[in-house]
Amino acid sequence: MSKVVLITGGSSGIGKSIGEFLTNKGFKVYGTSRTPKNYSSSKFPLLALDVKDVSTIKTSVASIIEKEGTLDVLINNAGAGITGPIEEIPEAEIKANFDTNFFGPINVIKAVLPQMRKQQSGLIINITSIAGYMGLPYRGIYSASKGALEILTEAFRMELKPFNIQMTNVAPGDFATNIAAGRYHAPLQKSSPYHTTYGKSLELMNAHVDAGSDPDMMAKAVYKIINTNKPKVHYKVGEFMQKFSVVLKRILPDTIYEKLLMNHYKL
């Protein structure tokens, strides 16, 4: 029997690429979207699910289990970008980002665990970000939400081992997706003390996404992990320098690394 896979945020970007790749490899894939009717040409079924709405999570998971009798792989991919000076980002937007990037994945995990425990098998892949390994200027909230999910996975893995349920993180670098269009931007205000530096950083961030890697790179990485007997705790996928930046943070003095980041962002 082919494995049954649930991918949150499967209507576009990395989630769509993973879903199409796994479908072509013979997996039974279910994606999710807040508005699945807008994606009628999807190559795999899209269920109505909002990671900020627990009732939609429970309904979608239950429908898959009822139809397939199993749920083998969860890919927590749904996420939201957010940029701006931390001082100027409204508290409501900060909480909304954590609801999507951190609490949302937790609630989806909670929904699938009873079935995976019953099966005595399962794999959960949390899509985080290389940005979660460091506090990036004007992306601090995004870095914090993805970093929190990375740390959570480390703890969750140990709790789930007795049930033969595996969990791992996959941290992508910059990929050519529509995440920039959908993320929250704190307004660039001329009266702001951050106007010049935030403006420069925003231009650089958008350029990185536009020139990002092909999302198929992530799809191939996820496929390889699914076919690995013992997945590692952390995976990083992206261009060499993006992955190497994590290594540099580990070996360089904090202030030297901070200076490298500030030079990179022209601060």
Image (cartoon, grey):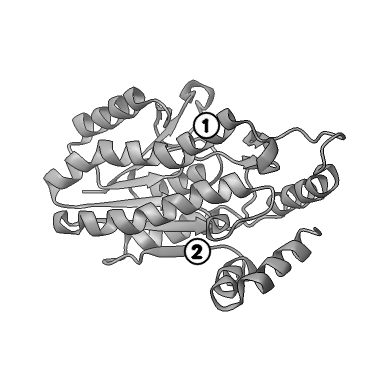
Check disc 2 and give the amino acid type: Lys
- Where residue 78 sits: x, y (%)? 47, 39
Badge 2 local density, few (<14 within 10 Å), some, or many (20+)? Answer: many
| Residue at the disc numbered 2 | 236
Question: Which residue is drawn at the image coordinates 53% and 60% (left, top)?
Answer: 133
Check disc 1 and give the amino acid type: Ala
Residue 76: tell me if it is visible. yes
What is the C-alpha distance between the residues marked 2 and 1?
A: 26 Å
The circle on residue 215 is none
152 displayed left or right of 58: right
Relative to 110, does residue 245 appear above or below in the rendering? below
204 displayed left or right of 44: right
Q: Foreground mark, 2 or 1?
A: 1
Q: Residue 70 lies in what quarter of the image?
A: top left
* Residue furthest out toward the bottom: 251
- Where residue 111 sits: x, y (%)? 26, 36
- Where residue 96 sits: x, y (%)? 52, 31
Question: Which residue is drawn at the image coordinates 67% and 55% (left, top)?
Answer: 212
Position of the C terminus, as image quadrant, is bottom right
Q: Residue 116 lies in what quarter of the image?
A: top left
Question: Quick one: label 2 or label 1, which is nearer the N terminus?
Answer: 1
In the depicted view, which residue is nearer to us: 194 or 54? Answer: 194
Question: At numbered mark 1, what does the secondary structure look like: helix, strand or loop?
Answer: helix
Question: Which residue is drawn at the image coordinates 14% and 58% (left, top)?
Answer: 162
Q: How many marks?
A: 2
| Residue at the disc numbered 1 | 96
